[in-house]
Structure formats: structure tokens, C-alpha cells
């Protein structure tokens, strides 16, 4: 089941973070760490989940940007948002990196959305003029 974990709204856009249960993959982990992860996820102490960040345009509801990451393991999924800021070298958390990626995608797609909305509005105006 998908859960909304966080929302940030501006006048024109909304950024949302969703999580969903994921399958634990311990391949590549050291055996002791893999056993600990399996034990804690199986007991419910830790949760394995995937994250999705979405940036939507408030006026149209169109998703303009998104980012995905699977295989996160935390006792409390809210800890995935460990910090918001970036240091001067641009390093930060997976969460802040995902938000930046989704925002960058939204910035690329926004001019296309504006153009299609303007075209739709012009077609609507032209239809009304013809009908009159």
C-alpha cells in the first residue's frame, strides 16, 4: 500500500513523497549485516520500502517530475528525510537528491505544459468565436 509521507506546496506546484513496501534484497551485503536486516525486517522492527517523489502542477494536476528509489531500510521511514539542506559541494541525503531530481525534471517539462495549456485555451476561444 502506498503512503503519503510528506508534502510541500507552493502557489503553483506540489511536491509529494510516497513510500510503498519493498522486497528486501540482501545480495551484496556482508553476511552478518544481511542476517540482521532479514531478522529486523521479518520482525517488523525495520521497514523495507521504496520512495517516490512527485512534482505536480496545481492548476492542471499534471505530474511534471518524479524520482524513484527502492530498497531503503529504516526503523522509522520518516528518518529517510534525515536532512533537507545541502552542503556547498552539493552533497546531501537520498531524499534531498530525489527532490532535486524531480524538480529538475519538472523545470524541463514545465514550458511544454505551459505551451499545451495555452494551445488548448486558444482552441477553446476559437471554438467559442466560431459558435457565436
Image (spheres, rainbow, N blue to C red):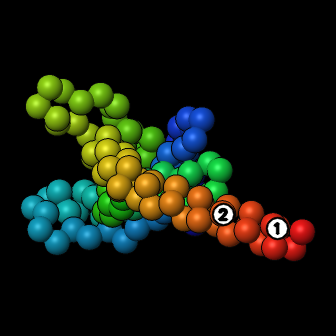
In the rendered image, the vertical position of residue 101 relative to residue 85, given as above or below: below
Quadrant placement of the C terminus: bottom right
Q: Which mark is residue 122?
A: 2
Q: Residue 8 carries which label?
A: none
For the N terminus, the image quarter is bottom right
Query: Circle 1 is placed at which residue position?
Result: 128
Q: Quadrant of residue 12?
A: top right
Query: Image height check: is 89 above or below 112?
Result: above
In the displayed structure, 60 sits above or below 132; it is above
Q: Which of 18 and 8 is in front in this view?
A: 8
Residue 81 image offset from top left, x and y in percent? 38, 39
> Could you tell me which residue is drawn at 54 percent across and 44 percent down?
13
Residue 80 location (% of width, % of height): 36, 43
Left-right relation of 58 to 131? left
Residue 85: quadrant of the picture? top left
Query: What whole-number distance in Å separates the C-alpha atoms at marks 1 and 2?
Result: 10 Å
**In the picture provided, is 27 more to the left or to the right than 77?**
left
The residue sitting at 67% across, 61% down in the picture is 121
Q: Position of residue 29 (x, y in %)?
A: 13, 63
Q: How crowded is mark 2: few (under 14 residues within 10 Å), some or many (20 or more)?
A: few
Relative to 96, is 69 above or below?
A: below
Q: For numbered disc 2, what is the local secondary structure?
A: helix
Q: Quadrant of residue 105?
A: bottom left
Proximity of marks 1 and 2: CB atoms separated by less than 8 Å: no
Which residue does the image show at 43% across and 47% down from the upper left? Answer: 77
Q: Which residue is drawn at 22% across and 36% down?
A: 92
Amino acid at each position: 500500500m502506498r503512503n503519503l509521507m510528506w508534502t510541500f506546496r507552493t502557489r503553483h506546484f506540489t511536491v509529494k513523497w510516497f513510500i510503498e513496501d519493498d522486497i528486501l534484497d540482501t545480495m551484496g551485503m556482508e553476511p552478518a549485516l544481511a542476517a540482521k536486516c532479514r531478522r529486523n525486517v521479518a520482525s517488523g522492527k525495520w521497514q523495507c520500502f521504496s520512495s517516490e517523489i512527485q512534482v505536480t502542477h496545481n492548476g492542471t494536476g499534471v505530474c511534471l517530475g518524479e524520482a524513484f528509489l527502492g530498497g531503503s531500510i529504516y526503523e522509522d521511514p520518516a528518518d529517510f528525510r534525515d536532512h533537507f539542506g545541502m552542503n556547498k559541494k552539493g552533497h546531501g541525503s537520498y531524499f534531498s537528491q530525489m527532490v532535486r531530481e524531480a524538480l529538475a525534471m519538472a523545470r524541463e517539462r514545465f514550458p511544454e505544459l505551459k505551451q499545451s495549456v495555452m494551445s488548448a485555451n486558444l482552441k477553446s476561444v476559437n471554438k467559442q468565436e466560431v459558435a457565436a
